[in-house]
Amino acid sequence: MNRPLKAVLISSLLAVTTAGSAVAAEIYKRPGLYSIDAEGWDLQPGQDGALILRCHDCKTPVQVQIDYSPERTGDAAKGGNKAFLARLDTADAQKQFAELMVEASLPEEIEVGEDVDIEIATVSKAKVGGLDVFQYVALIDGGGKVTQESSLVAIQRNRIVKVALNHYQGALDDAEKDRIAALFKSLSFD
């Protein structure tokens, strides 16, 4: 696939409209997993139980997606979040994992290096919403606008959780940054 076509696909994925969605005005809860204050965000169900939040009044497309894997069992469930984070003990391991996560989130028809270039800008560990997480910022360049993905990943209740914020790099104004900060400040893992 050529780079201009890829840029259109990435822009289309990020700029999906929210016409017809109701604006949430209270706490959204997924019992046993998390709660989040989604006021000012349009909520839509995603695939496999994911939650997609789109900024209602932002001038540029801003989307947050919260995904959980199926419950891990047997050997896959051993160690939990502490063991997961321990495996990400070096900057190289963190960068490689972040690259894998970004590549896995792209549509199948998109080829890294041919259609898009990915740069992992930052990697770190933090505590968000009461949960220790691995977080990264990736820049995805499809030849047009650069999409910034800021994600956090952890193991919670034997499930992999990923919370991904997507927007165009450098496109946010102060009000949009404040709205995003308030959303993430309200995120609480059970």
Image (spheres, grey):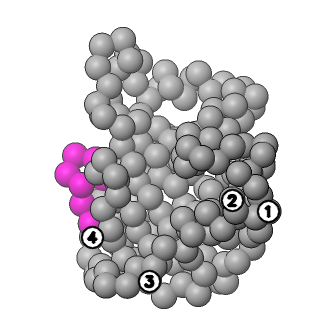
Q: Looking at the picture, does residue 169 appear above or below residue 87?
A: below
Region rendered in magenta: 28-34
- Residue 143, numbered circle: 1
- Residue 56, numbered circle: 3
Can residue 182 be seen here?
no
- Label 3: few (<14), some (14–19) or many (≥20) C-alpha neighbours in 10 Å: many
- Label 2: few (<14), some (14–19) or many (≥20) C-alpha neighbours in 10 Å: many
Q: Position of residue 114 (x, y in %)?
A: 78, 46
Compare marks 4 and 1 and give the one earlier in the sequence.
4
Magenta stretch: includes residue 79: no
Determine whether, in the image, residue 35 is placed left or right of residue 144. left
Q: Residue furthest top?
A: 75
**Image quarter of residue 165:** bottom right
Q: Which element carries disc 1, helix, strand or loop?
A: loop
- The residue to which callout 4 is attached is 27
Q: Which element carries disc 4, helix, strand or loop?
A: strand
Residue flagged by tag 4: what amino acid is it?
Ile
Q: Nearer the viewer, residue 168 or 92?
A: 168
Compare marks 1 and 2 and give the one earlier in the sequence.
2
- The residue to which callout 2 is attached is 6
- Label 1: few (<14), some (14–19) or many (≥20) C-alpha neighbours in 10 Å: some
How far apart are the two marked residues, 2 and 4, measured between alpha carbons?
Answer: 36 Å
How far apart are the two marked residues, 2 and 3, measured between alpha carbons?
Answer: 26 Å
Q: Position of residue 161 (x, y in %)?
A: 41, 42
Q: Nearer the viewer, mark 4 or mark 1?
A: 1
Seen at 54% across and 65% down, the residue is 13
Q: Looking at the picture, does residue 117 appear above or below residue 18?
A: above
Residue flagged by tag 2: what amino acid is it?
Lys
Q: Which element carries disc 2, helix, strand or loop?
A: helix
